Amino acid sequence: MVSIRWCLKIKNGIELIEPNENISESYFRMAEESLGTIKKVQRESKIWFASTTHYTLYYSLYSVMMRIGIKCEIHLCAIKFMKEFLNGLYDCKEIAYIEDAFEIRKNVQYYPSRLFDFKKLNQIAEKSSDFFIKTKDILVNLTNKDIEDIRAKLKGFKEK
């Protein structure tokens, strides 16, 4: 089971870095590009449809993390960070979308014989533009105080 403490200890897990608006914007543009690709790949490939849907959500999330100054190369740790520290910014349905998109993408990519819920993937893909827009709002409205509070809370976990 992935935990924040484990993610803080593991190589490429959660790491505090300097907040970076430029990198945040780069990830947001990557999310936008992925969002623009979803409809095209939906008809062509289940693999790329699952991946593109997941990465639209993930890059959106990671743009917020970079804006706060949180580096993380492990997707499950990024999702855990979202659940623990961004639950006031994203609601439980949005957190569920990214969790489900991750699981579906992982299963399609690494376990091709496993069945997956294509209907659920379609529902998540339909909601991905809302998630993207919500992320844009978060980035616009995120204050330095919000960033400091999130970073302080994470430091508290690290020191325990």
Image (spheres, rainbow, N blue to C red):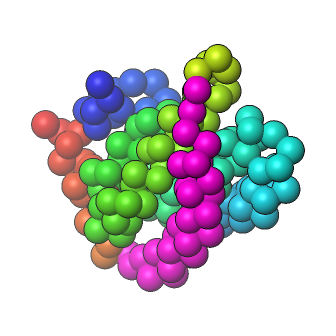
Q: Which stretch appears magenta?
A: 115-144
| Quarter of the image where the N terminus is located | top left
In the rendered structure, the answer to whether residue 87 lies left or right of residue 100 reads left
* Residue occupying image coordinates x 39% and y 24%: 10
Residue 16 visible in this rendered orientation of the protein: no
Residue 122 screen position, x and y as percent? 62, 53
* Residue occupying image coordinates x 38% and y 65%: 90
The answer to if 117 sits in the magenta stretch is yes
Of residues 10 and 110, the one drawn nearer to the viewer in this rendering: 110
Residue 100 visible in this rendered orientation of the protein: yes
Vertical arrangement, residue 116 with respect to residue 143, above or below? above
* Residue occupying image coordinates x 47% and y 44%: 100
In the rendered structure, the answer to whether residue 50 lies left or right of residue 20 reads right
Of residues 149 and 54, the one drawn nearer to the viewer in this rendering: 54
* Residue occupying image coordinates x 18% and y 39%: 159
Residue 2 screen position, x and y as percent? 32, 29
The answer to if 10 sits in the magenta stretch is no
Image-quadrant location for residue 144: bottom left
Q: Residue furthest left?
A: 160
| Quarter of the image where the C terminus is located | top left
Image-quadrant location for residue 59: bottom right
Residue 121 screen position, x and y as percent? 59, 48
Vertical arrangement, residue 97 with respect to residue 108, above or below? below
Q: Main secondary structure of the magenta part?
A: helix
Residue 124 screen position, x and y as percent? 55, 56
